[in-house]
Amino acid sequence: MPTEGLTNLRHEAAGVVDHPSGYLALCARNTVFAVDGQQGFIAYREQGRHYVIFGGVHARPTHREQLLDEFLEVARN
């Protein structure tokens, strides 16, 4: 992830990360899933056929379900 992208992610994370290990999501080695126009993200790594998510869905409670549904849709395809 470019430095600018990581800086923006850290700024956004301050408002949505509420998981005790949410700091793991900010590792530069992670891939970040986000939807344009929607605040929040999911940080993950691919391990073979699996995606390992770090810290859960980082979004406001009202946006978590939709963000997770969209991530799962992409992951299935």
Image: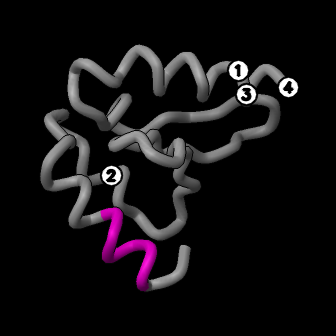
> Residue at point 49% right, 35% down?
53
**Left or right side of 77 for 53:** left
- Residue identified by numbered label 1: 73
> Residue at point 55% right, 73% down?
1
How busy is the neighbourhood of tag 2: few (under 14 within 10 Å), some, or many (20 plus)? some
> Residue at point 35% right, 60% down?
26
> Residue at point 60% right, 47% down?
45
Q: Is residue 6 above or below residue 64?
A: below
Q: Of circles 1 and 2, which is in front?
A: 1
- Residue identified by numbered label 3: 75
Residue 24: assigned label: 2
Magenta region, residue range:
4-9
Residue 77: assigned label: 4
Question: Closer to the camera, 75 or 64?
Answer: 64
Q: Is residue 60 above or below residue 26?
A: above
Identify the image's colour scheme: rainbow, by chain, secondary structure or one colour: one colour
How many numbered circles are shown?
4
Residue 28 magenta: no
Q: Secondary structure at mark 2?
A: helix
Q: Amino acid at mark 2?
A: Leu
Q: Are marks 3 and 1 in contact (CB under 8 Å)?
A: yes
Q: Amino acid at mark 4?
A: Asn
Secondary structure mostly seen in magenta is helix
Q: Of circles 3 and 1, which is in front?
A: 1
Residue 8: which quarter of the image?
bottom left
Q: Secondary structure at mark 4?
A: loop
- Find residue 41 and report its horizontal and vertical position in percent: 42, 43
